[in-house]
Image (cartoon, rainbow, N blue to C red):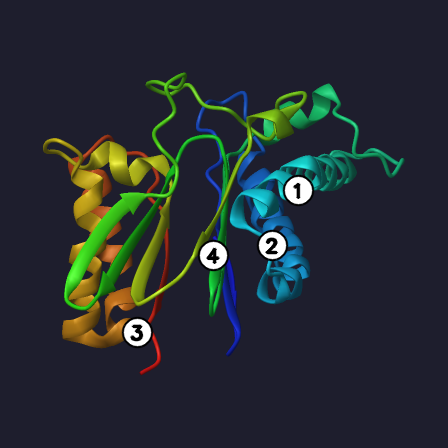
Amino acid sequence: MQHYADEQMAIVAVADGHGDPKYSSSEIGAQIAVDIACELLMELSEEIMQTSRPLRQLEEQLMVHFPQRIAWEWNRRVRQHAGHTDDSGVWHKDVSRYGTTLLGALITSKRGLFFQLGDGDILLMKERDGARQTERVFPLHDDLYGSVTHSLCQPGSARYARIKAIELTGSQIMVLSSDGVSDSLQGEPDPYLDVGPWMLSRVNEAGFKGAVAGLPSWLSELSLRGNGDDATMGLIYWRSKP
């Protein structure tokens, strides 16, 4: 996971390297992925804060180039780590062992931008005038199941990316997590939607820093009770100004 925050914005990126032995360098691939996501989202931040374009238009524009930039830069840096001497971001079979998924979020005072490639989840809980609404930013993939996932190490990985831009109003909490979190939760119909209200209650009880400090032990216990997969979570919480 990688993150950045100042008075104007917050950025979080979560990547989950693949566990199969053939992805022996996936931990490195995941670290490269979150570094790139934060860098490129930071580059976009001023445009997102200043633009007045409709959300759909913004999404369509970003889909043209943003996933391709992430894929190119990831391939370029991974190839360098693999010993390539050129400066190309064209896919090469040597990047396959670095396989990873990637989630990213940029939160500003008025808008949020979300990116996903592969499995994992992004949850947004809104609270305004005492009413709460919790939803996944992206619906569950209908073509992914079990351990099958899209990955940055695939040729043409950018075509599997998803982007969402939304207006932000009221107090909200946003959660990014690897698939190990939702896969380890039990219940019906969608236990992952309970994470937002639970996290909000923790923030209200212990403060943001206290809630974050308790996450590692909770995630470890969740993974042990679940499928044993790695469980990584990034959290952004903000309150609307009076």
- Inspect the image, locate mark 3, and give the three-letter code of the amino acid beneath it: Lys
Q: Nearer the viewer, mark 3 or mark 1?
A: 1
> Is there a contact, CB below 8 Å, between mark 4 and mark 2?
no
Give x and y (percent) for residue 195: 21, 50
Q: Nearer the viewer, mark 4 or mark 2?
A: 2
Mark 4 and mark 3 in contact? Answer it, CB < 8 Å: no
Q: Position of residue 230 (x, y in %)?
A: 35, 39
- The amino acid beneath tag 4 is Gly
- Seen in the image, is 134 located left or right of residue 57? left
Judge by depth and name the residue closer to the eye, 48 or 51.
51
The answer to which of marks 2 and 3 sits earlier in the sequence is 2
Spatial separation of the CA atoms under disc 4 and disc 3: 22 Å
Q: Earlier in the sequence, mark 4 or mark 3?
A: 4
Work out whether mark 4 precedes mark 2 in sequence or the reverse, and give the earlier one.
2
Q: Which residue is mark 4?
A: 112
Q: Which residue is mark 3?
A: 209
* Snapshot quadrant of residue 119: top left
Q: CA distance from mark 2 to mark 3?
A: 35 Å
